[in-house]
Amino acid sequence: MEKIRYGVIGLSMGAYHAKGVAAQVESELAAVYDPNPEAVAAVVRDSHPLRVAESWQEIALADDIDVVVVCTPDQLHEEMTISALEHGKHVLCEKPMALTREACAHMIAAAEATGKKLMVGQVCRYAPAFAKAKELIDAGEIGELYYVESEYAHDYLKVRGANDWRVDPMRYGLLGGGCHAMDLLSWIAGRPNEVFAYSNHKMLKDWPTDDTTIAVLKYPGDVIGKVFCSISCKRDYTMRSLFYGSKGTIICDNTSPEMTIFDENHAPRKLPIDINNHNVFAEISEMTAAIRENRQPSTTGYDGADTVSICLSAVESTKSGLPVKISYLKSSEKKISF
């Protein structure tokens, strides 16, 4: 069986993807590109010999690549993804899928027009603690859900990104980072239909967007939830998450070696969990399997667009001071629109 050949564009987060591809039996790392020679050198050291492309377009057009992994600043996702799709490649695009609903629609339209797979890298779905939480909830371990909560706590002063790409008026913290928490809750509780949010701008005062947001959401089945996002926390990164049900509670995050499960009598049970908050190995495995089995990946372009829409609806609420009904991408035979 021939290996699925991957090309990776962007070697910051993409370095994890490159290692994930190279470590698997069914995939092959064919080429990489990054404008930063140091980032390239670090990956080449671990994956020698390896072709280093001279431009991202070279990877998008290459005949010996089956999948393009787009791990560049969010502002570049749309152009690179569409180019790769139109040149016959499947695409795994890092989260957030894009910074606007329109860009998401264009990317999905390109995938549907070309018949190629488009997967969005919402990697928290593959974090062992969150995957286990969903497994337990789906199995009825804590009964009927009634409240869900997740936080994205980070300090972007420590990770501004090359050329300060995170400092962008279109890249709201809730979208760029908080999309992890939004996607996690939607994956477990279903797509929310309404959001009301507050935000402030007290820490990263030289940045163009608010740095802290709290959003309250309505989910199917009368479940309510909350997402807290701060890109200026003076603490270690975490995504602490809670799931309350009629028969118990789950408390977990993606950086701890255990999760806690409470039963109806409030008795706690500690469950050991592997720490792997960037489990791109599982993400790459899923993309490869989707191609082999000729099916859609578990996180499709529509899923990525849903998460972008939820985040942007919350941002709209912070600006209007009103709750916002969330609109989702609709497809038809002739067009894709919100």
Image (spheres, rainbow, N blue to C red):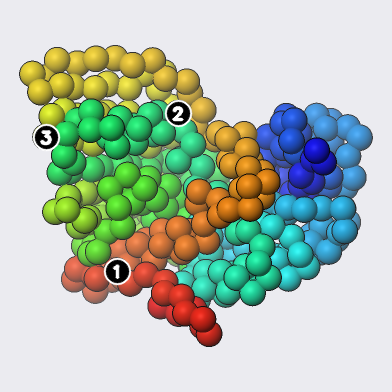
Q: Is residue 105 visible?
A: yes
Camera-nearest label, 3 or 1: 3
Image quadrant of residue 85? bottom right
Image quadrant of residue 245? top left
Q: Disc 2 on helix, strand or loop?
A: helix
User: Which residue is most to the bottom?
Assistant: 334
N-terminal label among 2 and 1: 2
Q: Residue at x 64, y 74 (%)?
A: 113
Disc 2: CA contacts within 10 A as few (<14), some (14-19) or many (>=20): many
Image quadrant of residue 111? bottom right
CA gap, disc 3 to disc 2?
Answer: 24 Å
Where does the N terminus fall, quadrant-wise? top right
Q: Nearer the viewer, residue 276 or 119?
A: 119
N-terminal label among 3 and 2: 2
Q: Nearer the viewer, residue 126 or 178?
A: 126
Q: Residue at x 41, y 62 (%)?
A: 306
Q: Residue at x 17, y 34 (%)?
A: 143
Residue receiving disc 2: 128
State the mark number for residue 326.
1
Q: Is residue 82 visible?
A: no
Amino acid bearing label 1: Ile
Amino acid bearing label 3: Ser
Q: Disc 1 on helix, strand or loop?
A: loop
Amino acid bearing label 2: Pro
Give x and y (percent) for residue 101. 46, 72
Where does the C terminus fall, quadrant-wise? bottom left
Residue 152 lies, with reference to residue 70, above or below; the image says above
Give x and y (percent) for residue 327. 33, 72
CA gap, disc 3 to disc 1?
Answer: 27 Å
Residue receiving disc 3: 246
Give x and y (percent) for residue 209. 41, 62
CA gap, disc 2 to disc 1?
Answer: 29 Å
